Amino acid sequence: MTDKIEGRTFPKGGALAAGHATAGYLGTTTALAATRANPSQVFFTPDLNDDGLLRVYAKINARIGGKVAIKLHTGEPHGPNIVPREMVKALQQHISNSCLVETNTFYEGKRNTTADHRETLKINGWDFCPVDIMDEDEAVMIPVQGGNHFKEMSVGKHMLNYDSMVVLTHFKGHVMGGFGGSLKNIAIGCADGVIGKKMVHAAPDNVDISKWLTGEPFMENMVESAKATMDHFGNRIVYINVLRNMSVDCDCVGVSAAPTKAHDLGILASTDILAVDQASIDMVYKLPEAELHDLKERIESRQGLRQLSYMKEMKMGRDEYELVTV
């Protein structure tokens, strides 16, 4: 079932937002990156616990202050793969004047209305601190600087109340994006459920919507949506990817998520959104074939790596990085 907005077609219902990637290992190794001029730093720990999360955060938090939004994908009810509650709690309690932030979904589920969303937050244990549903009081347009597809993007109105943002992401596969990293977390996760998410998912008229949503144009829409949020916060936004329970499915699938085959890898953090998502892909692509196969197929069948190349074209960061273990 489809609907229309501003000459574009978009689907109604279903878990929205994601994509697949292109073939092969694109990885930029630490050794190569270190020889190039000014690679971004990506901090890594294999310790998937409170201490590991706080250690990598300490390496990237120099400009985080004021009122702080922690953008987390809180998931559908009883989702088995979401970032562990105690890890998130440890980070939130460590960051002064912070709270979790989310937006309502576009697809019909248990988070597309504020009332249902708040019930789901309780079910999943996100009740240890305030959770700001940023589009609870509607939305606001913010500019997309240098956008080719959008000149502005609709985001949850409450986002303007924050001075800084910490993007805390469960890195995993995704039914449309191929993979969901920091880019997807803010591209879809900060867009409001009524207007912004429609904008990102809308396809031109006379286009096969099912193919469009798993192809490069959709990835480019996500990138430009994320750029609006990134530009809004400037140097007061940082990114953390948690590489555990990496199903091919997003946390928006909830209990229906496919079983994980890849082993847990650790936590990556950076002030550079492209570098942290590139490093995550590089690390995943080094998995043994039996563990990598399903994730790689999901990423590549959706052209998901276009997220990375288009971020580079939009000058949102560097794909050359130095991996620093902490």
Image (cartoon, rainbow, N blue to C red):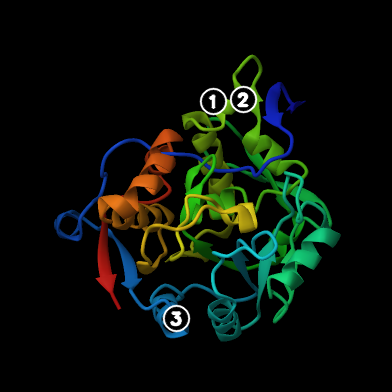
Q: Report helix, strand or loop for mark 1.
A: helix
Q: Position of residue 23 (x, y in %)?
A: 31, 36
Q: Is residue 31 above or below residue 44?
A: above
Q: Is residue 16 left or right of residue 224?
A: right
Q: Which residue type carries mark 1?
A: Lys
The image quadrant where one finds the N terminus is top right
Give the residue pinned by disc 1. Answer: 211
Per the image, the residue denoted by label 2 is 209
CA distance for labels 1 and 2? 5 Å
x and y percent of residue 185 in the render? 56, 55
Mark 3 crowd level (few <14, some 14–19, many ≥20, 10 Å Cα)? some
Write down the residue under mark 3: 49
Distance from disc 3 to disc 2, alpha carbons, whole Å, reads 40 Å
Mark 3 belongs to which amino acid? Asn
| Location of residue 321 by image quarter | bottom left
Q: Secondary structure at mark 2?
A: helix
From the viewer's perspective, is residue 298 above or below residue 132? Answer: above
Tell me which numbered mark, 3 or 2, is placed earlier along the sequence: 3
| Most distant residue in the top direction | 206
**In this view, 45 is above or below 222:** below
Are circles 1 and 2 on residues that touch, CB within 8 Å?
Answer: yes
**Amino acid type assigned to the residue bearing label 2 in the image:** Ile
Q: Secondary structure at mark 3?
A: loop
Name the residue at 54% across, 42% down. 175
The number of numbered badges drawn on the structure is 3
Residue at 49% in and 30% down = 215
Badge 1: residue crowd in 10 Å (few <14, some 14–19, many ≥20): few
Taking depth in this image into account, of 107 and 37 the one nearest to the observer is 107
Residue 24 image point, x, y percent: 26, 39
